[in-house]
Amino acid sequence: MQLLGTILNTRFWLMVMGAFLVVFTGIALISGQAVSSASTFWTGELTERELNIASVVEVVWFAHMLGMGAIIFFIGLLSANPARARIGAIAVVAMMGTQFIAGGMASTFGYNGFNGFNIFAALFMLIPLITLIACLSKLNAK
């Protein structure tokens, strides 16, 4: 049981999740990948205006994840137990919740998100899930 508690270290997982989001979204924004891949997330052929709008949507989406990643990283770095677990759980649910809500709402307009299942999609789901489990397991710690 102590090994499980060590593996589910809230500081570690919050910092991993925050760093992953900052690095992943930062690289996508700096390299232009967020803009260049925008058309692949939408169904059908896009006009030039629609492509510009799709690019802005992706940049805003990635910028939101970058900011949330930085917040989650600093929660892990600067918060003390048990507040870290409580604030971390709220932050992870807020971050993932906004992504699912936004993706779900955008899907009604033809947004597909990740096409297929790749390593980034797996990490984007697995790391927050482990982080949330870590935070929830320490929620009532003294």
Image: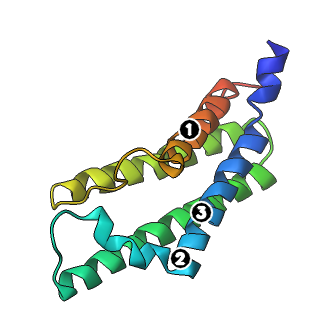
Identify residue type, mark 1.
Leu
**Nearer to the camera, 73 or 116:** 116
SS of the residue at dot 3?
helix
Q: Residue at x 51, y 42 (%)?
A: 122
Q: Is residue 105 above or below residue 8?
A: below
Q: Which residue is mark 1?
A: 126
| Circle 2 residues within 10 Å: few <14, some 14–19, many ≥20 | some
Circle count: 3
Question: How far across and down, in percent of the image, does residue 104 sit?
Answer: 26, 50
Q: Secondary structure at mark 1?
A: helix
Residue 116 against residue 38 in the figure, above or below: above
Query: Where is 111 relative to 86, above or below?
Result: below
- Picture quadrant where residue 139 is located: top right
Residue toward you, 52 or 3 = 52
Q: Earlier in the sequence, mark 2 or mark 3?
A: 3
Q: Which class describes the residues within 10 Å of circle 1: few (<14), some (14-19), or many (20+)?
A: few
In the displayed structure image, the side of residue 27 where residue 1 appears, left or right: right
Q: Which residue is mark 3?
A: 24
Label 3: how many Cα within 10 Å (few below 14, some 14–19, many 20+): some
Which amino acid type is shown beneath numbered disc 2? Answer: Leu
Q: Which of disc 1 and disc 2 is earlier in sequence?
A: 2
The quadrant of the rendering that contains the C terminus is top right
- Per the rendering, the mark at residue 29 is 2
Would you identify the image quadrant in which residue 46 lies? bottom left
Q: Position of residue 109 (x, y in %)?
A: 15, 61
Residue with the most extreme top position: 1
